[in-house]
Amino acid sequence: MPDIFLDRDGVINYNRTDHVKSWEEFEFLPGSIEALVRLKRADYRVFVITNQAIINRGIVTPAELNYIHLRMLEEVSQAGGQIKAVLYCPHRPEEKCGCRKPQPGLIRLAEQEYGAQVGGSWLIGDHLDDLTAGERAGCRTMLVLSGRSTQASLEGRQLQSASDLAEAVEIILRVRSA
Ligand SMILES: [Mg+2]
Ligand SMILES: [Zn+2]
């Protein structure tokens, strides 16, 4: 069974230019929880992969970030959805790690740690760096316009796109059943 890889900010929750630094600043996007429930009902496993350089910048601690993710997972599972795991890159860009998107390291980690299946999988993100990471790992990719990218920012590039996670999931389930 192929898996779904989701970026976090701008896909599941509102992107904040000043970063999500606490649970109070975490706000689900409209329809994102319901989209996760649909994926669960369709037996997809969902992995969240997210760049969180605010860790190594010293803006939030790993414990604070883990708490945000714990609460996120709780809300999703209370609604009937499931996120299998959250994998994050703590590094600053200048550290040149292999896990900060557009590098595919977090997807590789999901394969190693959780047996994630990249063949036939989808990566959904709100930034071209997310899609590049997915392409490098061998995922199909979809851009959502609920975060940092707009229709205009695509500049005519031929990308599969959706307005938000709800529409992205609609497309994925339709493609699968076609
Ligand atoms: Mg994002
Ligand atoms: Zn990293």
Image (tube, rainbow, N blue to C red):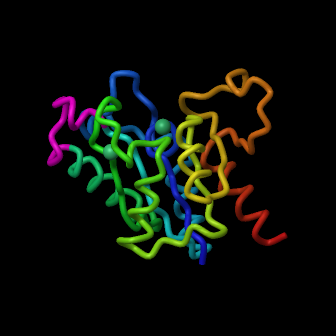
Tell me the magenta residue range. 53-64
Q: Nearer the viewer, residue 148 or 116?
A: 116
Position of residue 51 measured from the top left corner of the image (x, y, whole percent): 38, 41
The N terminus - image quarter: bottom right
Is residue 78 visible in this depiction of the protein? no
Residue located at (46% from left, 68% from top): 80
Is residue 63 visible in this depiction of the protein? yes
Q: Nearer the viewer, residue 79 or 10?
A: 10
Residue located at (49% from left, 64% from top): 46
The C terminus - image quarter: bottom right
Q: Is residue 42 left or right of residue 86?
A: right
Q: Is residue 17 left or right of residue 142?
A: left
- Vertical side of 107 occupied by 101: above or below: above
Residue located at (60% from left, 48% from top): 165
Q: Quadrant of residue 35?
A: bottom right
Q: Main secondary structure of the magenta part?
A: loop
Q: Nearer the viewer, residue 100 or 150?
A: 100
Q: Nearer the viewer, residue 18 or 96?
A: 96
Residue located at (39% from left, 71% from top): 112
Q: Is residue 68 left or right of residue 100?
A: left
